[in-house]
Amino acid sequence: MSRNDQITLAVDQNSKTWTGIPFAIEDAFWEWIKEIDVQKKINVYRDVFYRPGFKAMENGTRERMMIAQRMGEGGWHVQVDSDEYFLDFGTFSQFLRHHSRWTRPGAAPLDIGIFWMPLFKQVGNGFLYIKDAYETLPIATNRPDYKMARASDHLIRYAPFCLFHQTWARGEQEVWTKANSIGHVDHFNVQSYFNMWKAIDRHNYRYIRNFHPLIPSVWPSLEWGPGKDVPEFIANYRPNHSLTVPLRVYLRRRLGQWKKSWMQK
């Protein structure tokens, strides 16, 4: 990190999720933050991020804008959620610095998109993850103007970087709480999907097909990898898998944005 980099860690001051469910953070977490923040880059931002009467997605988008305003204008704004794990953040940060010209005054609004690989369930001393999903998400922007979660109306410049998202790979109670707190809680039957998730195990996962809660075909199948926790799973994953997406997937996304850019001219 450069001397101008900063990290803002946002926490609801009333310890409530976007749907108003209480949560607790153990003291050990804050001790860990002190240990790793040797450069004093992390600023804890406490505010009221839950508003009664707002939908979960509305509260989430509002919080993201509040974080952006707190950090101020200029440079790249990168928003990574607490359940997201970059496979190679160092190289991604080098990519952003290499393209710092896109953040100069007068530059057109632009988002940087990367590829998501969801972790679905922890079973049998390992994790089930979505095979060949390659979902995309905007992870960085030169001009925060979030319309829904991290999405805006900007053009997206895709880069072939990946991160694992600990989507449903948690304990039952935590999954239930998360499922009832996420921004899409109003868009699918939470109870029915939760029951399906509980029934999947180390033996029957091979038979699960097209099971994304909103757009089924986005999650075509599951794969299993060893690891007692997410860091160990990723450490085992790295030597045997590419840390980037297939070229055909990357180019297809780039082509789509090129067409969008051309049509807007």
Image (spheres, helix red, strand yellow):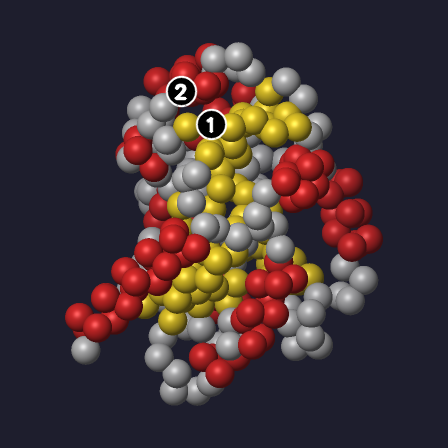
In primary-sequence order, the first of circles 1 and 2 is: 2
Tag 1 and tag 2, C-beta contact below 8 Å: yes
What amino acid is labelled 1 in the image?
A: Leu
Residue that appears at 56% across and 16% down: 202
Nearer to us in this view, 265 or 32: 265
Question: Can the viewer see residue 89?
Answer: yes
Q: Position of residue 189 (x, y in %)?
A: 31, 24
Nearer to us in this view, 2 or 233: 233
The residue beneath circle 1 is: 222
Q: CA distance from mark 1 to mark 2?
A: 7 Å
The residue beneath circle 2 is: 208
Q: Quadrant of residue 54?
A: top left
Residue that appears at 41% across and 39% down: 133
Q: Position of residue 88 (x, y in %)?
A: 62, 55
Label 1 neighbour load within 10 Å: few <14, some 14-19, many 20+: many
Quadrant location of the C terminus in the rendered image: bottom left
